[in-house]
Amino acid sequence: MTEKKKVCMLCGKPSGESICESCKSNVQGEAAHNKQKMEKQVKVGSEVEKDKIVKKHLDK
Ligand SMILES: [Zn+2]
């Protein structure tokens, strides 16, 4: 018998879909989290750059 068992491609657990419900919500939550993180990093990055420029001017 070559019955193909459908399993989640992320956690490997038996699932009706290629990605089970728990992993689906996990991925969605992570994507939203990463987006927030990236936006935060960009904000912090520009703040650091500003700080560097200010310090450079003060050093002179
Ligand atoms: Zn899964």
Image (tube, grey):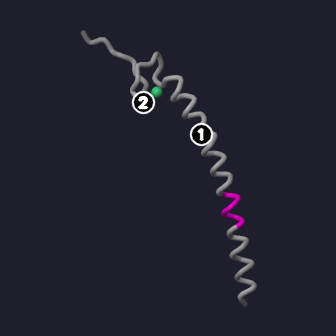
| Quadrant containing the C terminus in the rendered view | bottom right
> What is the residue that sits farthest to the top in this orientation?
1
Q: How many marks?
A: 2
Q: Look at label 1 and name its amino acid.
A: Ala
The residue at 73%/71% (across/down) is 50
Mark 1 and mark 2 lie on one chain; the one further toward the N terminus is 2
For the stretch drawn in magenta, the main secondary structure is helix
Task: Determine the image quadrant of residue 8.
Answer: top left
Residue 52, above or below 35: below
Q: Circle 1: is it few (<14), some (14-19), or many (20+) Cα within 10 Å?
A: few
Span shown in magenta = 42-47
Q: Look at label 2 and name its amino acid.
A: Cys
Question: In the rendered view, does 55 fall on the left or right side of 34?
Answer: right
Residue 12 percent location from the top left of the image: 39, 27
Residue 3, above or below 8: above
Label 1 or label 2, whichever lies nearer to me, is: 2
Residue 60, above or below 38: below
| Quadrant containing the N terminus in the rendered view | top left
Task: Determine the image quadrant of residue 35.
Answer: top right
Q: Are marks 1 and 2 in contact (CB under 8 Å)?
A: no
| Residue named by callout 1 | 31
Residue 21 percent location from the top left of the image: 53, 23
Point out which mark residue 45 bears.
Answer: none
Residue 41, above or below 17: below
Instruction: Verify whether residue 18 appears in magenta.
Output: no
Q: Circle 2: is it few (<14), some (14-19), or many (20+) Cα within 10 Å?
A: few
Question: Does label 2 point to a residue whose CB lies under 8 Å from ligand 1?
Answer: yes
| Residue named by callout 2 | 11
Task: Determine the image quadrant of residue 34.
Answer: top right
Work out how far the residue at label 1 is from the one at label 2, CA to CA, in angstroms.
17 Å
What kind of element bears circle 2? loop
Question: In the rendered view, does 22 fall on the left or right side of 10?
Answer: right
